[in-house]
Amino acid sequence: MSQTSHPVPARLIIASRESALAMWQAEHIRDRLRALYPQTEVSILGMTTQGDQILDVTLSKIGGKGLFVKELETALEDGRADLAVHSLKDVPMLLPEGFALAAIGEREDPRDAFVSNQYASLAELPAGSVVGTSSLRRESQLRARFPHLIIQPLRGNVQTRLRKLDEGQYAAIILAAAGLKRLGLGDRIRTEITSEDSLPAVGQGALGIECRADRADVIAALQPLHHAETAACVLAERAMSRRLAGSCQVPLGGFAEAQTDGTLRMRGFVATPDGKRMLRSEALGTLEDPEYLGEQVAEALLAQGAGEILAALND
């Protein structure tokens, strides 16, 4: 869709959660849009979502990450905002009718980060150490590799999680490297955990910009922010998760990387929460048809018995 066929709106309002990381992301997109379209007034509408309000229960028990998105979509629907900026890993695999992912930004570091004040790596943690994470994906992989550690839930924004670590509630916590780096907290990372040791979440490190599907003017204006290679990787990952009906209730990871020869390498896993059963799959595909690749990886996992794990978790 060419920009010339749709004049850039005179005003653009970005809906965003009010956490420090969400606001950084919204401000980053605001500044990019202001540089592209100096004549357009770009502002941010800060909002508190249900996912931000309920902090004493794990996400998997209260309806999943869609709770971070719903209020922003309502603002798009009723015209209070023109676009919403999300961490793509928080965006449900199926968007509601009438909404579109207009652009996917270039990926930041997709890896998980090991954060601790006493220890340099997971391997250094003594038996019985308490590790905090809010993610069943991370938890299952940790339990599989380090059954001698105690994994406990950790909710709240990045600063809250770091404070709980600093207060001594945890020996270590696992966070997304991207969020720490975007907030200027990269020095808190003791080790970036390789994707071989902790396969990232679907969409981790990438920003998704959502708008109403009927806003052709907004979609056209956002195209310069779209990063084709990141989008191909993320579309493969999301197709895998969609085929497996992935949600916060499921320990599932999916990660695609563009290779130097132009192919796309995709890895996925499904596990039981205790990490005792871990199914893995890998495939190569093309940047031109990433969703087919993601579906291939999902089918291979289903052939290994992923359906039984998923059915048991969704009961």
Image (cartoon, rainbow, N blue to C red):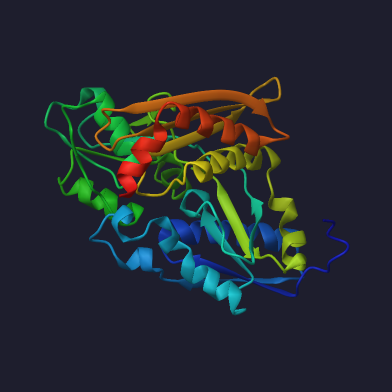
> 182 or 78: nearer the eye?
78
Left or right: residue 272 versus residue 89 is left
**In terms of image quadrants, where is residue 51?**
bottom left
**Residue 100 can be seen, yes or no:** yes
Q: Residue at x 24, y 31 (%)?
A: 143
Q: Is residue 63 above or below residue 184?
A: below
- Between 149 and 60, the one nearer to me in the picture: 60
Left or right: residue 235 versus residue 253 is: right
Q: Residue 209's x, y, as percent?
A: 61, 57
Residue 181 horizontal side relative to residue 166, left or right: right
Q: Position of residue 114 (x, y in %)?
A: 32, 34
Q: Is residue 188 visible?
A: no
Q: The N terminus lies in which quarter of the figure? A: bottom right
- Horizontal side of residue 267 vs 127, given as left or right: right
Image coordinates of residue 67 in percent, x first then y, are 41, 63
Tell me how many marks there are.
Answer: 0
**Rendered position, 189 above or below 24:** above
Q: Is residue 164 above or below residue 48?
A: above
Residue 119, by quadrant, is top left
Q: Position of residue 45 (x, y in %)?
A: 53, 73
**Given the current orientation, which residue lies at the most extreme top position?**
261
Q: In the current view of this chain or complex, which residue is farthest to the right?
A: 4
Q: Residue at x 21, y 51 (%)?
A: 164
Q: Residue at x 39, y 45 (%)?
A: 185
Q: Residue at x 64, y 67 (%)?
A: 98
